[in-house]
Amino acid sequence: MARKSYQEKLAELREDILYMSEVVMERLRMGLDALEQKDDALAREVIEGDGEINRMYLDLEQDCIDLLALQQPVASDLRFIAASFKIITDLERIADLAVNLGEYTLDAEENLFPDVDVQEMGELTLEMIEDAMIAYDTEDVDQCRELAARDDDLDHFAERASEIVVRDLIERELDAPEEVELLLQDVSRLLLTIRDLERVGDHAVNIAARTLYMVENDDELIY
């Protein structure tokens, strides 16, 4: 493969990964909207669309393999391909978490914990993903480090939300066994939602970590 063509392939890979991130973010937005509006049709659309994301991931995985196989890349190109391969894995897992939101929507009856703002937490995670992908596109290492620091805020948000749910559960007075069972199901669903959104933030940090490694050969954020 000629060097010019090879560089074009690298640029194409970056563009395709940015496109994948846009699709994944849209699915996450849809999952959050479905959960907020109790929109079962939208939830099913997110769930059924997971196959498209998986196919996109496999195609990009093959592109990374082909780029490695067709020409021995120099160090910077090698780091770019390796980082890109890890980033598409994080994006695919974010899409899986969006599917979880769709499934929680189908299981949910009503919002029994209005003091827990799942949508605000969801917006924080979407901003983190978007900023991580901008950093990847522009090779902005300062934004990578700043985004990793913001993850602490998301973790604190998740911790406070979980505490609200548990405290509310303790304070409720329920008599009928069926009421207790239904409430525990709702509590479990909400705690899983909080956990999954926290994991989305972790994947955004992973993207930033791989970008920092790609640009500066610095593994300080990789864990």
Image: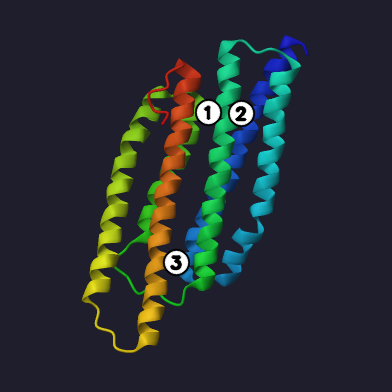
- In the rendering, at what x and y percent does residue 212 appear? 44, 23
Name the residue at the bottom extreme: 176
Quarter residue 13 falls in: top right
Question: 187 left or right of 109?
Answer: left
The answer to whether one can see residue 122 in this image is no
Question: 87 left or right of 174?
Answer: right
Question: Front-most of 135 and 88?
Answer: 88
Please determine whether, in this image, residue 158 is positioned above or below residue 136: below
The residue that disc 3 covers is 36
Q: Are marks 1 and 2 in contact (CB under 8 Å)?
A: yes
Q: Secondary structure at mark 3?
A: helix
Q: Residues within 10 Å of mark 2 (few under 14, many from 20)?
A: some
Q: Which label's residue is closer to the chain start, 3 or 2?
A: 2
Question: Front-most of 171 and 87?
Answer: 171
Quarter residue 163 falls in: bottom left
From mark 1 to mark 2, how far is it between C-alphas? 7 Å
The colour mode here is rainbow
The residue that disc 1 covers is 137
Q: Residue at x 55, y 46 (%)?
A: 93
The amino acid marked with disc number 2 is: Arg
Name the residue at the right extreme: 1
The residue that disc 2 covers is 14
From mark 3 to mark 2, how far is it between C-alphas? 33 Å
The amino acid marked with disc number 1 is: Asp
Q: Secondary structure at mark 2?
A: helix
Question: 92 left or right of 38?
Answer: right
Q: Residue at x 64, y 53 (%)?
A: 50
Q: Residue at x 37, y 74 (%)?
A: 184
